C-alpha cells in the first residue's frame, strides 16, 4: 500500500515528469540485463505510476485551467501541470474558450489544410489474441492476405479516387506477412503513392530502415493502452504481449529515419483521461528525441467488432475536451480522426483541431476492389463515416477547409 508521502511524490512526478530515458532504446528491442529495463520511452513511462495519474488530474482546479489557457493565449508552451488541468473535469466549464483557442492555434500552425489518406489492409491474419479486436486469433472469421496482383487492384482503385497517401495494415502474423512481403508491397505501389505509411506488427530498427528504402515514409503504432495492468489483461497471446517492445517501437522508427510517426491510445480500455495524459507524454518525448520527424496523435474510441461487446462509453463532450487539450499541449502535432467517428462529429472537429482524416475506409483486405459482398474477408472494426472520398472532400471544401491528398513527396524516389 502506498504511503501518503510516496503518493505525493508520484503525483509530483506526473505533474513534472523527466523526459530523459535511462538509455536509448535497443535497436532490436532487447532489454539491458544490467538495468532490467528497455530504455527509450519505456523507461520514461516506467517512472510514472499509472493509477496515480487520475489523482493528479483530479487535483487540478478551475484556477489551474484558467492559468493554462492564459499561458496558451500568450503563446507560451504548456507544461504537464497545464496539460493535466485541460484534461481534467474542471476544464469542462471552459470548453468554449478551449475550442476557440484550439481553432486559433490550428489555423496558425496548419492554415485550413486537412490531410486525407486511406487505409489499405494487406492482411487480416493474426496470431495475437487482443480482447478488443475482430482479427483476434480466436475469432472464427474469413482470413485473407492479398497477393501482389490483388494489391495492385486495390491500389489502382484508391489511386483513381485521388488518394496519394496510403496506410498499409496487417495483423500480427510474421509468417503470412513477413518483412519481405511488406517490402515487396511497398515496392509494388510506390509508383502511385508518394507517401506510404505502415501500421503492422512492431519491427526492429533495421527492418524499418529496409522498408524506408522501399518507399515507406511513415509509421503508425498505437499503444492501445498505457496502463500496464490493463495491457496484460487485454493482450492474452502473441507478440503483442510484449508491452515494452511496443512502447519503444516509435523510438526505433525515429532512429531508422522515418519521416512521420503516429501514436495513439484506444479509449475504452482503461481510464481515458490517464491514457490521454500518457499520449501527451509520449508525444512530447518523441518531439524532444526526434525533432525532425512529424508527429501525429490519435484517440480512437473503441468500436464494435467480432467478439467485442460491452463497449465503455466516452461521451462526445469529454472526447472533445481531450482533443482540444492535445492541440493546445502539442500545437505542432497532426491530430488524426478516423472513420470510426460519425460524419457530423468529424465535420465539427475539422473546424476546431483535427488536421488529418482517413476517407472512404474499408477495414477488410480486398475491401475496395477485390472482394464481392459475399466473399469479403472480415473487417477489423465497423466504421461510422461511410461517405465516399469525393463526398468528404466536397464537404470539407464547403466548410472552408483545404483538403489535400499529399503533403510532401521525395524527388529522390
Ligand atoms: S489488435 Fe492487432 S495484434 Fe491484436 S488481434 Fe487485432 S490485428 Fe491482431
Image (cartoon, grey):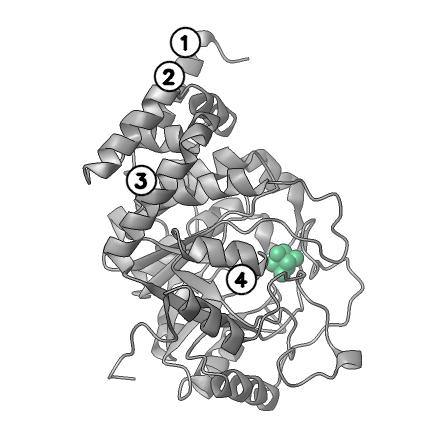
Query: Which quarter of the rendered image does ligand 1 occupy?
Result: bottom right
Of pointers 3 and 1, the one earlier in the residue sequence: 1
Which callout, 1 or 4, points at the residue further toward the start of the chain?
1
Q: Residue at x 23, y 38 (%)?
A: 73
Residue 159 at x, y percent in the picture: 48, 85
Crowd around label 4: few <14 · some 14–19 · many ≥20 (10 Å) = many
Task: Respond yes or no on whether mark 4 lies under 8 Å from ligand 1.
Answer: yes
Callouts 1 and 2 close, C-beta under 8 Å:
yes
Residue at x-position 40% and y-position 43%: 324
- Disc 3 to disc 1: CB gap under 8 Å: no
The residue labelled by disc 2 is 9
Q: Which residue is mark 3?
A: 21
Taking the view exactly as shown, the residue that stands out farthest to the front is 398
Instruction: From the image, state whether disc 3 or disc 1 is nearer to you.
Output: 1
Residue pointed to by mark 1? 5
Q: CA distance from mark 2 to mark 4?
A: 36 Å
Amino acid at each position: 500500500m502506498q504511503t501518503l508521502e510516496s503518493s505525493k511524490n508520484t503525483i509530483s512526478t506526473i505533474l513534472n515528469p523527466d523526459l530523459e530515458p535511462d538509455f536509448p532504446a535497443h535497436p532490436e528491442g532487447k532489454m539491458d540485463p544490467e538495468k532490467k529495463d528497455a530504455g527509450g520511452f519505456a523507461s520514461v513511462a516506467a517512472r510514472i505510476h499509472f493509477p496515480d495519474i487520475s489523482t493528479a488530474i483530479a487535483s487540478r482546479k478551475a484556477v489551474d485551467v484558467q492559468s493554462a489557457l492564459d499561458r496558451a493565449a500568450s503563446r507560451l508552451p504548456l507544461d504537464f501541470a497545464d496539460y493535466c488541468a485541460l484534461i481534467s473535469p474542471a476544464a469542462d466549464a471552459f470548453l468554449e474558450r478551449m475550442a476557440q483557442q484550439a481553432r486559433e492555434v490550428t489555423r496558425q500552425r496548419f492554415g485550413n489544410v486537412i490531410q486525407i489518406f486511406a487505409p489499405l489492409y494487406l492482411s487480416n491474419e493474426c496470431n495475437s489474441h487482443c480482447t478488443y479486436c475482430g482479427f483476434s486469433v480466436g475469432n472464427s472469421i474469413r482470413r485473407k492476405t492479398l497477393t501482389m496482383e490483388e494489391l495492385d487492384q486495390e491500389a489502382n482503385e484508391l489511386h483513381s479516387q485521388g488518394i496519394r497517401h496510403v496506410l498499409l495494415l496487417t495483423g500480427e502474423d510474421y509468417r503470412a506477412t513477413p518483412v519481405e512481403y511488406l517490402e515487396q508491397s511497398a515496392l509494388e505501389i510506390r509508383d502511385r503513392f508518394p507517401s506510404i505509411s505502415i501500421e503492422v506488427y512492431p519491427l526492429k530498427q533495421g527492418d524499418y530502415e529496409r522498408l524506408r528504402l522501399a518507399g515507406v515514409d511513415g509509421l503508425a503504432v498505437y499503444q492501445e493502452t498505457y496502463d500496464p495492468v490493463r495491457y496484460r489483461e487485454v493482450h492474452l497471446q502473441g507478440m503483442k504481449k510484449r508491452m515494452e517492445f511496443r512502447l519503444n517501437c516509435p523510438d526505433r522508427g525515429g532512429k531508422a529515419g522515418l519521416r512521420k510517426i503516429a501514436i495513439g491510445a484506444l479509449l475504452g480500455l482503461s481510464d481515458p483521461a490517464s491514457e490521454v495524459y500518457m499520449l501527451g507524454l509520449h508525444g512530447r518525448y518523441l518531439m524532444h528525441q526526434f525533432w525532425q520527424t512529424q508527429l501525429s496523435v490519435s484517440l480512437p474510441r473503441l468500436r464494435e467488432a467480432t467478439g467485442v461487446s460491452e463497449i465503455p462509453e466516452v461521451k462526445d463532450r469529454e472526447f472533445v475536451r481531450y482533443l482540444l487539450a492535445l492541440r493546445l499541449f502539442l500545437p505542432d502535432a497532426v491530430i488524426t480522426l478516423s472513420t470510426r467517428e460519425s460524419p457530423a462529429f468529424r465535420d465539427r472537429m475539422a473546424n476546431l483541431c483535427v488536421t488529418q482524416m482517413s476517407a472512404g475506409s474499408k477495414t477488410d483486405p480486398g475491401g475496395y476492389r477485390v472482394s464481392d459482398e459475399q466473399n469479403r474477408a472480415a473487417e477489423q472494426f465497423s466504421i461510422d463515416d461511410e461517405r465516399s472520398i469525393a463526398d468528404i472532400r466536397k464537404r470539407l471544401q464547403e466548410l472552408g477547409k483545404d483538403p489535400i491528398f499529399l503533403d510532401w513527396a521525395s524527388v529522390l524516389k
